[in-house]
Image (cartoon, rainbow, N blue to C red):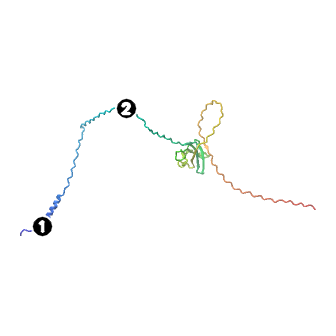
Amino acid sequence: MGPHRIPPHLLRRAGLGVALGATLTGIVVAQPTAPPAPVPTEAPIAPVAGPAAEEAPPAIVSIPTPAVVAPVEAKDVAPAAAPKEQVAEKPVEAPIRRTRYNIAVLQALDKVTAETLRFEAAVGQPVRWKGLIFTVRACERSAPDEAIEDAIVYLSIDSQPRPQPGRPTPPSREAFKGWMFASSPGLNPVEHATYDAWAISCRAAAPAPAPVVAAAPPAKAPVAKAPEAAEPKVLELPAAKPAAPPPKAVAPPAPEPKAAPVVAPESVPPT
């Protein structure tokens, strides 16, 4: 048989495919390529000084030569003068102290009988009311520069019942000690099961009249020893009197019956 012949239309198709492949290859080759990444270089390693290495000599620092300054003449120097205006220092005002008094006005309450009593207690004088003993140590009023006008009393209250026959007397104990404020009774109250007390006010005692002493010739009096300080006596407060019962209504007495008048018989003359 003779050689096989390729049809001409197949040859034309093969030529078009080869030409298209060459065009695509040229386009890919013509694109720019990215530059290669730089290779990091290692930092030089400093030599490690061994124990036998010699130390570097210290640096020599040159000291600058001081500059020569011409002396200042006396005629060019002005004397120091005080300032023309001096601001005077403001004086510090001392705080106003509270005024102290020697008599405190207190009020006590018996929670069982609802009995109240307002009384006065002198400073340093113990005062007994029922089972309580009040001893005032200080009584003062607020200063004029304070915001609230108040009376403040420092006192101690001891619970000391009176001894009763046939019963053991309980020991005395301290029921209260501290400051009482008249404007705020609940700020520092008395903690007692039977009694309560609070401050009312402070006042000064009336001055006692000076005694009149007759003039006497001076005489040397014997030196007497000072008496020993005695304990202050306890001032007893009178208990409140119970209210008298109202009088009972008394019926008026019945009127006595009046007796009938006796009429004397008339005398008949004799016949």
Question: What numbered label is drawn on residue 12?
Answer: 1
- Kind of residue indicated by mark 1: Arg
Identity of the residue drawn at 10% across and 68% down: 8
Report the front residue among 4 and 158. 4
Report the front residue among 208 and 193. 208
Residue 125 percent coordinates (x, y): 59, 42
Number of marks in the rendered image: 2
- Kind of residue indicated by mark 2: Lys
Query: With respect to residue 125, does 115 lie above or below?
Result: below
Identity of the residue drawn at 12% across and 67% down: 12
Report the front residue among 260 and 131. 260
Q: Name the residue under label 2.
A: 75
**Mark 1 or 2 closer to N-term?**
1
Residue 182 percent coordinates (x, y): 55, 47
Tell me if mark 2 has few (under 14), some (14-19) or many (20+) residues whose alpha carbon lies within 10 angstroms of its own.
few
Quadrant in the picture for the N terminus: bottom left
Q: Do the residues labelled 1 and 2 touch (CB within 8 Å)?
A: no
- Secondary structure state at the residue bearing disc 1: helix
Q: Which residue lies furthest to the front in this view?
A: 75
